[in-house]
Every structure is written in C-alpha cells, then in structure tokens.
Image (cartoon, grey):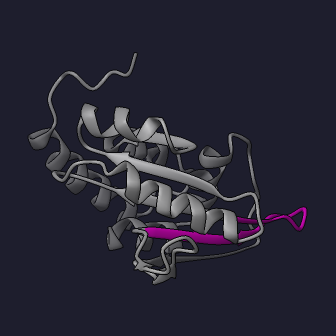
C-alpha cells in the first residue's frame, strides 16, 4: 500500500493518471497530496476509520477533489467499510470519488456496487504502465508487484 502511495507521490504523471481514471476525464493536478491510513471520523457512527489511500488535489481549473481508496489482497471486501468511506467522502464538500482495488473477482464484484471505480490490481498496474515517465522506481515496482499478483490471481478475473 505505501509503495503505491510512494509511486503516486514521486513519479511524474502517476497521480494525475490515477486521479484521471477515478474521475473519468483527463486532469492536470498542479497541487496534490497522497496519504495512507489517515484517521477519518465516520460522521454516522463517530468511529475513527482508516482508508488505505487518500488523495487531496486541486486541478488546473481550481476544482478541489478527493479520492479515497480501499485495497485488498486476501481479505474479503466489506461493503460496510466502503459505505463508511463514502460518508467520509461526502463530508469533504467536494465531488469525492471512492475507489476499490482488489486481487480477486469476488472482491471486485462486491465493491462494484458501492464505489465509483472498482479495479483488479493488474488494471492498476496497467494504468501505472501508461505513465509517460517510466522511472527506474516505477519499473522496479511494477516488475515486483506484477510477479506477486500473478502468484495470487487466477484466470477468472474478467468482469461481465
């Protein structure tokens, strides 16, 4: 998780590509911050919760945006957890996006019902491969992570 955040922070164009995917349009982000496991207060329950990834950004047009994301490998997708994150996003006062990245078909399909973007890890890697600046850090990350995901994943990943 922290490696993805690091890549989004330091590789030119990576965060813009990621956020553009979440918003379904090309965005230029002169300002952005990427945080992991930041504590957030659920406005409904009052509980402190920790989304895996949060991106706060300002577009070139001055629009404030927020992306919250949950990432899973082996653990099941919890719809209640995603609903908590949705409430946090709504509370930001921006047009927040909620994303899910999972390793298994059951995770991605479960999340698809309550997030804006639901991806397999290999889709996330493809997105990062499309970044124009293929730095050594990014290439090493992709080589390493794609190897791990291939060991875990099976052929039934295609969404209907």
27 falls in the magenta region = no
Residue 19 placed where, x, y %?
62, 55
Residue at the image point whose x is 80% and y is 64% from the top:
59
| Residue 153, percent from left and from top | 16, 36
Indicate whether residue 58 is drawn in magenta: yes
Q: Residue 118 occupies which quadrant of the picture?
A: top left
- Left or right: where does residue 139 sit relative to residue 16? left
For the stretch drawn in magenta, the main secondary structure is: strand
Q: How many marks?
A: 0
Q: Which residues are magenta?
A: 53-65
Place of residue 23 in the rendered image (x, y in percent of width and height, measured from the top left): 68, 47
Residue 38 place in picture, x, y as percent: 46, 82
Give the vertical position of 39 relative to 136 (above or below): below
Whether residue 19 is visible: yes
Q: Indicate the quadrant where residue 60 lies.
A: bottom right
Whether residue 59 sits left or right of residue 80 in the image: it is right
């Amino acid at each position: 998780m922290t490696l993805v955040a690091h890549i989004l922070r330091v590789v030119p164009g990576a965060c813009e590509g990621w956020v553009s995917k979440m918003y379904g349009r090309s965005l230029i982000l002169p300002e952005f911050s990427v945080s992991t496991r930041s504590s957030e207060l659920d406005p409904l329950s009052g509980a402190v919760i920790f989304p895996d990834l949060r991106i706060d950004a300002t577009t070139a047009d001055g629009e404030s945006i927020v992306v919250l994301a949950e990432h899973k490998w082996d653990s099941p997708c919890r719809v209640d957890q995603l609903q908590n994150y949705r409430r946090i996003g709504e509370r930001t006062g921006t047009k927040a996006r909620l994303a899910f990245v999972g390793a298994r078909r059951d995770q991605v399909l479960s999340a698809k019902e309550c997030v804006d973007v639901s991806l397999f890890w290999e889709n996330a890697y493809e997105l990062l491969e499309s970044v124009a600046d293929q730095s050594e850090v990014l290439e090493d990350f992709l080589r390493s992570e794609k190897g791990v995901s291939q060991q875990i994943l099976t052929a039934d990943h295609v969404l209907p």
